[in-house]
């Protein structure tokens, strides 16, 4: 039995690793094949090697967007091949034990599906059973806006020539999540995020709405429309966190995050209007998304982002402080301006479907922050581990 991972063939049942001449030889002799390639390349790769698939074999993929993957399988695979796809909902640096692993029985016998389950059980992940459509909608709901927010932060900090951990404005508590996860995302490959954003129609819609929410809230701040801003924020809060949906205990508390800082903690916390957090809840409200509905499929990044967002919106005093800061304090105006530009720019690149444009912007920001990746990755892993323990069972 062989698993195809790009051009490497790993033998699971033999005591040796055999490098095959090409993908056709792999397809002819393999009982189970996983296509682990970028979503934008999945059709071309399956078109090249899919017709050589062994009679009765099981074929799947690991892309984060299943629409193009399943379409490629249906188009290029023989009708006598089983299709069972999967997707681990966490990054490469996270222990898969207990994390959600989506399994999609698209076209397969019960026996073939059970075989895939039995092989993947070694990961220790929590199996979640979805259709292709359910998977793409849920991954959009739990990842698209989250990624857009962090990507926009990195773009804004680079535009202002900032390393945020070197200024007391961005140190401590909630700010630690922003910095560590932004750096964690930019330390990965660009295509991990581009595939989900560009090829998933639900993700495109959500990223567009996030940019609109950022822009509209920022305009209210600039114009000094306090009551209109407050009414909008409270309406979003009630829609997302009201109605008895939230457990009494918070997912996260500010003090839990203070220990994960890349810089020296300031003597006092500077007030921030948290435009990025306000916009994400506004976006969920506008799209009718209730994030708690998807906790079983949530990624570690999503749980952290939801945790600090919930912390802000369920703290009446802090939320009022944020509104006052947004209207009366100009400390973060230049940062918010660049953040708004960045959110709109990412949305534009995604809407146009330009992978090269997405890559160019991502890698330019990646180069800017690259010297701090090793430290940030180590700290980010510790933070994720701690937060996952705090949110276990949620």
Image (tube, rainbow, N blue to C red):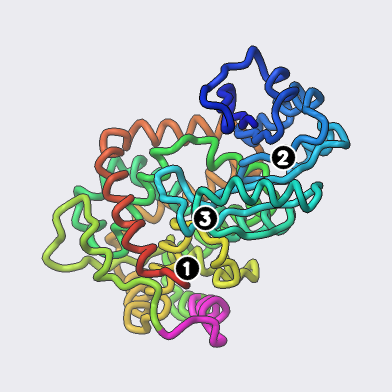
> SS of the residue at dot 3?
loop
* 13 or 306, nearer to the observer: 13
Residue at the extreme top: 21
Q: Residue at x 24, y 57 (%)?
A: 260
The answer to whether the residue labelled 1 contacts the one labelled 3, judged by CB atoms less than 8 Å apart, is no
Dot 2: element = helix
Q: Position of residue 287 (x, y in %)?
A: 64, 67
Residue 311 vertical placement versus 209 (above, below): below
Of labels 2 and 3, the one closer to you: 3
46 displayed left or right of 39: right
| Residue occupying image coordinates x 25% and y 42% | 375
Which residue is rendered at x = 26% and y = 68% of the image?
256
Residue 349 visible at all: yes
Name the N-terminal-most of marks 2 and 3: 2
- Which residue has dot 3 on it? 125
- Give yes or no for residue 215 being in the magenta stretch: no
Estimate the x, y position of residue 389 in percent, counting from the top left: 36, 65
Q: Residue 247 or 123: which is nearer the viewer?
A: 123
Q: Position of residue 385 (x, y in %)?
A: 34, 57
Q: Which residue is mark 2?
A: 69
Q: Is residue 89 above or below residue 31?
A: below
Q: Which residues are magenta?
A: 233-248
Secondary structure of the residue carrying tag 1 is helix
Which residue corresponds to mark 1?
A: 220
Distance from disc 1 to disc 2, alpha carbons, whole Å, reads: 42 Å
Residue neighbourhood size for the residue with mark 2, other residues' Cα within 10 Å, grouped as few (<14), some (14–19), many (≥20): many
The answer to whether 163 appears left or right of 239 in the picture is left
Rendered location of residue 326, percent (x, y): 37, 69
């Amino acid at each position: 039995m062989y698993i195809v991972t790009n051009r490497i063939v790993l033998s699971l049942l033999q005591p040796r690793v055999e490098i095959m001449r090409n993908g056709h030889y792999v397809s002819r002799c393999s009982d189970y094949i996983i296509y682990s390639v970028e979503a934008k390349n999945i059709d071309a790769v399956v078109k090249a090697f899919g017709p050589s698939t062994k009679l009765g074999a099981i074929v799947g993929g690991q892309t984060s967007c299943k629409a193009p993957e399943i379409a490629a399988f249906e188009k290029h695979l023989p009708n006598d091949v089983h299709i069972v796809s999967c997707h681990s909902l966490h990054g490469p640096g996270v222990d898969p034990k207990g994390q959600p692993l989506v399994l999609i029985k698209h076209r397969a016998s019960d026996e073939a599906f059970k075989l895939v389950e039995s092989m993947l059980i070694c990961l220790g992940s929590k199996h979640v059973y979805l259709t292709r459509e359910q998977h793409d909608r849920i991954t959009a709901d739990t990842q698209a806006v989250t990624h857009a927010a962090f990507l926009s932060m990195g773009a804004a900090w680079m535009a202002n020539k900032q390393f945020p951990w070197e200024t007391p404005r961005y140190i401590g508590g909630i700010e630690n999540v922003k910095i560590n996860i932004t750096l964690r995302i930019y330390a990965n490959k660009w295509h991990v995020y581009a595939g989900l954003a560009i090829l998933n129609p639900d993700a495109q819609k959500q990223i567009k709405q996030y940019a609109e929410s950022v822009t509209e809230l920022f305009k209210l701040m600039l114009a000094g429309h306090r009551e209109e801003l407050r009414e909008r924020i409270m309406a979003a809060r009630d829609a997302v966190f009201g109605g008895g949906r939230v457990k009494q205990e918070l997912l996260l508390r500010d003090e839990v995050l203070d220990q994960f800082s890349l810089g020296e903690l300031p003597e006092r916390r500077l007030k921030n209007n948290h435009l990025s957090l306000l916009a994400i809840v506004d976006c969920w409200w506008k799209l009718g998304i209730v994030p708690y509905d998807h906790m079983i499929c949530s990624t570690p990044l999503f749980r952290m982002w939801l945790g600090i967002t919930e912390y802000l919106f369920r703290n009446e005093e802090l939320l009022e402080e944020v509104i006052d800061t947004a209207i009366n304090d100009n400390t973060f105006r230049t940062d918010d301006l660049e953040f708004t530009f960045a959110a709109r720019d990412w949305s534009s690149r995604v809407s146009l479907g330009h992978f090269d444009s997405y890559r160019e912007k991502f890698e330019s920001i990646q180069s800017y922050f690259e010297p701090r990746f090793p430290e940030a990755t180590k700290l980010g892993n510790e933070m994720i581990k701690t937060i996952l323990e705090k949110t276990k069972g949620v």
